[in-house]
Image (cartoon, rainbow, N blue to C red):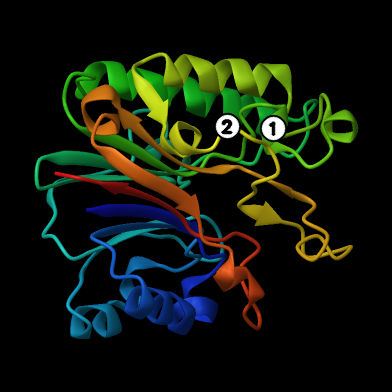
Amino acid sequence: MKIATWNVNSIGVRLQQVLNWLADNPTEVLCLQEIKCVDEKFPAQPFREAGYFVTHYGQPSYNGVAIISLIEPHDIETGFDGDAATGQRRFLSATYNGIRVINTYFPNGQALDSEKFVYKLGWMKNLRHYLDARCDPNTPVALCGDFNIAPDDRDVYDPVAWAGQIHCSPQEREALQEIKDWGLVDTFRQYQSEGGFYSWWNYREGGFRRNMGLRIDHVWASNPLAEKCVAAWIDKIPRTWERPSDHTPVVAEFSL
């Protein structure tokens, strides 16, 4: 079973890219972020015609999350306490064959001295509260999405330049560690301990060509699920396509 995550930076713009990727990479559960689309206009039919179930929680112009799956979802949740009230749609969760999949689009935070940064840290605290209240680390859980945080310096192309900056600040990394301490494993790091692997590259300055990126998109798993992880990788191919998202898919495969 494959679980993947991909910030598509507008499903309206990249619908065909997602369909093409799924045609080449059949995936049981694909979590999408930044769909930038209201629910009424989400292009669900092409996915259904390809044999997928579609669950979405969108809003106009910004944010929004969706899950495309070959498995029928159950127990769908949209938003959590302190999240839905803000109107920012960043959280979608459902169960697939006994695995609780949580699709998240963490706030960017903008800058360390901004209100958006305070919101980001508060949102992360609420996510940890959700895990404590609604999930069990002794059961299969996958936390996926664009975390907007590089967990450590291996995940940054220039750690010196990015030190203390948004996505790499000690405050963000500490808050992310608190979420991880609930009982989650970074599946990519189970198979790759070296640096230099990224999931996001700036559109400017030849970021992708020069591999000036950050690893901010993740598939994390609770221990019972992580023990069944047989592979995890970053698929850079979609980033080479015309008019790509600035992110690329991250995939984890499990033997169930």
The residue located at (31%, 43%) in the rendering is 230
Query: Of the numbered discs in the image, which one, if any, rests on residue 193?
Result: 2
Up-down relation of residue 74 to residue 236 (above or below): above
Residue 22: where, in percent of width, then height? 35, 74
What is the spatial separation of the Cα atoms under label 2 and label 1, in whole angstroms? 8 Å
In the image, what residue occupies the spot 35% across and 59% down?
A: 66
**Amino acid, disc 2:** Ser
- Residue occupied by mark 1: 154
Mark 2 and 1 residues: CB-CB less than 8 Å, in contact? yes
Indicate which label's residue lies in the foreground, 2 or 1.
2
What residue lies at 64% left-to-right and 46% top-to-bottom?
197
The answer, for residue 89, to whether it is visible in the render is no
Quarter of the view holding residue 9: bottom right
* Residue 177 vs residue 155, the one in the foreground: 155
Q: Is residue 72 above or below residue 45?
A: above
Q: Secondary structure at mark 1?
A: helix
